[in-house]
Image (cartoon, grey):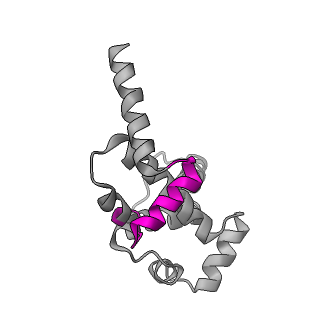
Amino acid sequence: MRHPIDGADSSIKTMMEDFVSEAIKATSLSFSHAVRDLIIKLLPIQRCTITVVAKYLAVSERTLQRRLKDEGMVFETIVDDVRKDLAWDYLTGQKMRISQLTALLGYTEQSSFNRACQRWFSRPPLKVRSEAANTNSHQMTG
């Protein structure tokens, strides 16, 4: 293992090391993506606070906020965006009760989820679900 390889080309080695480094950088998640992934995991257990997320990322709350700000993001906005995306997926594709959706999205009260749905989609959750069901049935028959 310690002996050099016959015919080894150090320039190819350097080129490959550079390639691998760039590939790792290109595929690594931004800080905000890491935060978003944690939010998705923490919402259902209703532990999605900036304090908990910062602790999981081994940074202070202040550092978390600063790094998000550097990417033009705000923690609360990311949480709201994740909830909106998940709510749409759950309402249009899942057949679980609204109370279950409410809990999965990290809300303790269904009324909070109802207000959020109204803000996001300009209609309550049951209306979103029924419109999606009607659209899906028209697509299957059409």
Quarter the N terminus occupies: bottom left
Taken as a whole, is the magenta stretch helix, strand or loop?
helix
Q: Position of residue 98 (x, y in %)?
A: 33, 56
Residue at (40, 77) in percent of width and height: 47
Q: Nearer the viewer, residue 63 or 140?
A: 140
Q: Nearer the viewer, residue 121 or 23?
A: 121
Is residue 44 rendered magenta in the image? no
Res 140 quadrant in image: top left
Q: Position of residue 74 (x, y in %)?
A: 65, 69
Quarter the C terminus occupies: top left
In the shown orientation, is residue 53 left or right of residue 141? right
Q: Which residues are magenta?
A: 103-123
Give the residue furthest to the left: 96
Does residue 1 appear in this view? no
Residue at (45, 43) in percent of width and height: 128
Res 72 quadrant in image: bottom right
In the shown orientation, is residue 128 left or right of residue 74? left
Q: Position of residue 39 (x, y in %)?
A: 46, 67
Q: Nearer the viewer, residue 98 or 61?
A: 98
90 w.r.t. 135: above or below: below
Q: Nearer the viewer, residue 20 or 123?
A: 123
Residue at (53, 79) in percent of width and height: 50
Residue at (27, 51) in percent of width and height: 96
118 w.r.t. 105: above or below: above
Does residue 109 appear in this view? yes
Q: Position of residue 44 (x, y in %)?
A: 35, 67
Task: State how many labels appear.
Answer: 0
